[in-house]
């Protein structure tokens, strides 16, 4: 039993994970990945935005540390062609049989359209189609089909993994959450409080019709008791995300419209300092886990208690006095 116990709502042992890549060049991570496993972390989850791609850090880990499960949280559905994505998924599943999960999401208009030059159109249908195509392609059969957002004519994977990887859907509101529950093996969630998990998990459970589904949460953590410094830094991260339309709509759905209206209004008029100042402490404290290591571990446990099955802790450098690896050790499941 680790420090986070078991999640009582679904009766399964929790999977405490960490976000990668870790600090420093990728070639230097071998010993650190081994230490993660020694500390009781079971999973590592990569992200893809403007740093390392999602697959390379996991490919290295597949060879270096067989105790860790590997997952993407997430790969955008838009930024690789269907066949190219299927090849990457199959290759990593072949390299790490039985311990790879592919997380797919719509990402955002900023990453997809502004950074990658791909129209951010029909995100629900695009994610759904990619999930359906991956299920078709990973069967090893030839894929000939017209999906709503693309067509594939005659593609067959040359690699059929021994174990089909779990497919997870990054979701915010009800449509994507239900898609994750109905057509995938679970969901990936982020930028929400432990109490928010209760609402999200209920949507997933209802849509799944009693079939157990994985719920992976990226949890932003800064184990520092310098609350004002943490809050000041956290406001920049919150503003960067929660002004993106998909995240703004998510938090309106969660009931934070009144708390965030000041930030949203100021941001729309270009008043960045006013927008930061308008973010209440209560919102920061809801969305960012901070305080002593013991307080942080207790709050992380609440995510699991409310329905999360797997965590991906993201250590946030809001306190310049905090060293990343000290935080990793302080939050360790075996601590």
Image (cartoon, rainbow, N blue to C red):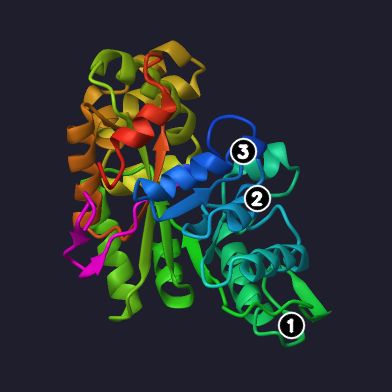
Q: Which residues are magenta?
A: 1-18
Q: Earlier in the sequence, mark 2 or mark 1?
A: 2
Disc 3: which residue? 110
Report how far apart the C-alphas of labels 3 and 2 lie in the structure.
9 Å
Q: Nearer the viewer, residue 171 or 267?
A: 171
Residue 322 appears anywhere in the view = yes
Q: Is residue 68 above or below residue 320?
A: below
Instruction: Identify the residue shown where x is 63% and y is 56%.
Output: 63
Tell me the residue at 39%/19% (across/down).
Answer: 233
Q: Residues within 10 Å of mark 2 (few under 14, many from 20)?
A: some
Is residue 120 toward the left or the right of residue 229 in the image? Answer: right
Which residue is under mark 1? 145
- Residue carrying label 2: 120
Above or below, 335 against 321 in this view is below
Q: Secondary structure under badge 3? A: helix
Where does residue 328 sit, x and y in percent of width and height? 37, 35
Picture quadrant of residue 5? bottom left
Q: Assign a secondary structure to mark 1.
A: strand
């Amino acid at each position: 039993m680790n420090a986070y116990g078991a999640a009582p709502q679904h009766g399964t042992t929790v999977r405490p994970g960490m976000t990668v890549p870790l600090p420093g060049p990728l070639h230097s991570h071998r010993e650190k990945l081994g230490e993660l496993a020694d500390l009781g972390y079971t999973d590592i989850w990569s992200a893809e935005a403007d740093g390392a791609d999602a697959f390379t850090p996991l490919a290295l880990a597949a060879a270096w540390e067989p105790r860790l499960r590997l997952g993407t949280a997430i790969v955008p559905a838009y930024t690789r062609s269907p066949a190219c994505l299927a090849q990457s998924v199959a290759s990593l599943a072949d390299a790490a049989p039985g311990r790879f999960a592919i997380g797919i999401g719509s990402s955002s208009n900023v990453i997809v359209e502004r950074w990658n030059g791909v129209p951010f159109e029909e995100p629900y249908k695009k994610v759904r189609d990619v999930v359906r195509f991956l299920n078709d392609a990973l069967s090893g059969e030839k894929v000939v089909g017209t999906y709503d957002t693309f067509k594939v004519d005659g593609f067959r994977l040359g690699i059929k993994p021994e174990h089909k990887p779990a497919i997870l859907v990054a979701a915010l509101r009800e449509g994507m959450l239900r898609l994750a529950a109905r057509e995938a093996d679970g969901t990936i969630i982020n930028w929400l409080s432990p109490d928010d998990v209760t609402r999200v998990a209920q949507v997933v459970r209802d849509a799944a019709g009693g079939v157990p589904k994985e719920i992976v949460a990226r949890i932003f953590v800064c184990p520092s008791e310098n609350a004002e410094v943490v809050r000041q830094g956290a406001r920049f991260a919150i503003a960067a995300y929660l002004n993106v339309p998909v995240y703004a709509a998510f938090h309106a759905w969660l009931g934070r419209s009144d708390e965030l209206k000041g930030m949203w209004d100021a941001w729309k008029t270009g008043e960045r300092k006013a927008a930061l100042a308008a973010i209440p402490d209560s919102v920061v404290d809801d969305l960012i886990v901070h305080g002593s290591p013991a307080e942080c571990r207790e709050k992380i446990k609440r995510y699991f208690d409310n329905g999360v099955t797997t965590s991906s802790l993201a250590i946030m450098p809001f306190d310049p006095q905090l060293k990343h690896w000290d935080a990793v050790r302080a939050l360790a499941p075996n601590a």
